[in-house]
Image (cartoon, rainbow, N blue to C red):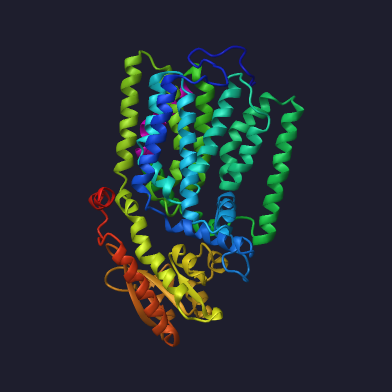
């Protein structure tokens, strides 16, 4: 039977709930703030195209149309971050750039994560190990500035695990906190409820005779059920549209597991060590179960757009925390220090050696001079409202900046395609004014994501070929009656954006470094 220990376990000493400020802690917090500030400054230009999918839903919501992809059409749930989308709405209503709001919000979340990692371990080695692994992991900063909910979600999961560890150690927890974290996690990402559940279950079991705990949990369940029923009735499906596109790619999931385990191997070993030792078994098992439950959906879905370990990052702060606690318990201290150096060093090297790191470091600049420029060009085109329709694969910045009604023929934001309709049939029936096709340097592909490019673009004119990066182009096709003005507007915006860019198309560390230092 799981009960609260009467006294602290050896090797995992309880301490006061509130940590008194001290010079080492103040210095540590200053390091966290400076590191986050410098990292955000160095990577500020990066915004991921997928973030503009969220911003499009939020923009339509701010305009009074609700969280919809195309105003006036049947709603489709092409996002999985409801709370993050809702967070952007009031700022968009006030005219604030949503990408700036997202970056600053994530930066605050990263600082709070650093504070939690700094205050939980008991030893200097544990604190340095936990915070060092987090701050020296390059993806930390790329996910701060990417524009998505990644860092905020990771903070919620970390806080839930910390509260769970405290109640397992016989310490008290605010009666409202875990139920609220359950709601926050579940509304930030669907798997969030699964990630917070282990800590909540531990807390409920230990307070099973506490009526207030059950009232708060019941209240959270009612709110969560209300949200679920609302989204089911509004969007018309049990699960988000993206689930029907992504789920079941087991081969991709297996590759994701291999890459993730290798990148975070020392942290995972330390979590297992924490769970294996009798004195630290409770926090170790809680951390391990949380990580497994959090990663399980990704392992069976082969997550797309998993740039620089995006989905694995949701559990990285928990792994850093568990590693710090494991280092606390290692003896002699010199061994703990050596293990900590290896763990932090490995994690740092894994971050900078991620195959797509140079691509993502230069991604924002590339996106601005291609997708954003195409979108702005479409917005400026003298095309009547009913004809402002397009079909795209990269369904972020182009639809967002154009504000045209869009068909996402990958299917993430298209209900018919997600449920099995052929993209060629959907695009052909819609007959959009503009079709944007992703291809290589040799020209548009014969087929792309199930779309017969030649068939759907027959009768269209190719008005622009826009170079994103090495062997990655956007080809813009327009109906003849609008080809002249649309082509001119798009080429004008692309030319302006390219003139303001760094003038390079290579995806290299050198290019990023020259841009930052220049």
Query: How many numbered marks, from 0 up?
Result: 0
Question: Where is residue 475 shown, x and y percent of the image?
Answer: 36, 73
- Residue placed most toward the observer, 13 or 115: 115
Q: Is residue 445 above or below residue 468?
A: below
User: Can residue 60 be spotted in the picture?
Assistant: yes
Question: Splitting the image into 4 quarters, where does residue 282 fall?
Answer: top right
- Residue placed most toward the observer, 247 or 470: 470
- Residue placed most toward the observer, 44 or 359: 44
Q: Is residue 299 above or below residue 165?
A: below
Residue at 61% across / 64% down in the picture?
63
Q: Is residue 27 above or below residue 113?
A: above
Please state if 493 lies on the left or on the right of 245 as rendered: left
Question: Where is residue 200 shown, x and y percent of the image?
Answer: 63, 32
User: Can residue 472 be spotted in the picture?
Assistant: no
Q: Is residue 96 magenta?
A: no
Question: Where is residue 291 shown, x and y percent of the image?
Answer: 49, 36
Residue at the extreme front of the image, as rendered = 94
Q: Quadrant of the N terminus?
A: top right
Question: Which contiguous range is marked in magenta?
Answer: 261-276
Residue at 47% across / 56% down in the picture?
51
Q: Name the dominant secondary structure of the magenta segment.
A: helix
Q: Is residue 271 magenta?
A: yes
């Amino acid at each position: 039977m799981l009960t609260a220990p009467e006294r602290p376990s050896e090797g995992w000493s309880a301490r006061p709930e509130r940590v008194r400020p001290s010079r080492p802690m103040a210095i540590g917090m200053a390091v966290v703030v400076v590191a986050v500030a410098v990292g955000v400054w160095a990577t500020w230009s990066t915004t991921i195209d997928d973030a503009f999918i969220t911003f499009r839903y939020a923009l339509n919501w701010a305009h009074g149309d609700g969280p919809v992809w195309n105003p006036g059409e049947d709603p489709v749930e092409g996002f999985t971050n409801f709370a993050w989308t809702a967070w952007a709405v009031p700022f968009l209503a006030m005219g604030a750039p949503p990408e700036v709001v997202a970056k600053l919000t994530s930066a605050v979340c990263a600082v709070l994560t650093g504070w939690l990692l700094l205050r939980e371990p008991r030893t200097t080695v544990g604190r340095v190990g936990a915070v060092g692994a987090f701050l020296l992991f390059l993806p930390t900063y790329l996910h701060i500035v990417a524009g998505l909910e990644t860092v905020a979600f990771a903070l919620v999961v970390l806080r839930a695990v910390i509260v769970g560890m405290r109640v397992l150690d016989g310490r008290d927890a605010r009666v409202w906190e875990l139920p609220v974290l359950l709601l926050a996690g579940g509304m930030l990402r669907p798997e969030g409820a699964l990630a917070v559940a282990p800590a909540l279950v531990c807390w409920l079991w230990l307070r099973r005779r506490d009526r207030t705990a059950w009232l708060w949990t019941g209240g959270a369940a009612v709110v969560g059920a209300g949200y679920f029923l609302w989204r089911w009735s509004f969007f018309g499906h049990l699960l988000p549209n993206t689930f029907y596109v992504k789920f079941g790619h087991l081969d991709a999931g297996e590759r994701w597991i291999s890459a993730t385990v290798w990148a975070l191997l020392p942290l995972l070993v330390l979590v297992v060590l924490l769970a294996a030792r009798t004195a630290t078994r409770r926090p170790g098992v809680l951390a391990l179960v949380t990580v497994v439950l959090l990663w399980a959906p990704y392992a069976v879905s082969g997550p797309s757009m998993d740039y620089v370990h995006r989905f694995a990052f949701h559990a990285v702060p928990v792994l850093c925390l568990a590693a710090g606690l494991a280092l606390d318990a290692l003896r002699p201290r010199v061994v703990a220090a050596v293990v900590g150096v290896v763990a932090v060093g490995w994690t740092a090297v894994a971050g900078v050696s991620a195959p797509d790191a140079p691509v993502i470091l230069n991604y924002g600049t590339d996106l601005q001079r291609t997708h954003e420029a195409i979108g702005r060009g479409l917005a400026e085109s003298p095309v009547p409202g009913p004809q402002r329709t397009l079909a795209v694969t990269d369904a972020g910045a182009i639809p967002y900046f154009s504000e045209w009604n869009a068909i996402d023929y990958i299917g993430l934001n298209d209900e018919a395609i997600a449920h099995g309709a052929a993209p060629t049939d959907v695009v052909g029936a819609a007959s959009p004014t503009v079709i944007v096709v992703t291809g290589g340097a040799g020209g548009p592909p014969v087929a792309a994501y199930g779309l017969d490019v030649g068939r759907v673009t027959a009768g269209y004119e190719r008005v622009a070929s826009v170079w994103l990066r090495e062997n990655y182009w956007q080809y813009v096709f327009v109906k003849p009656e609008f080809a002249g003005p649309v082509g001119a507007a798009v080429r004008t915006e692309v030319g302006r954006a390219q003139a303001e860019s760094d003038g390079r198309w290579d995806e290299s560390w050198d290019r990023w470094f020259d841009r930052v230092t220049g």
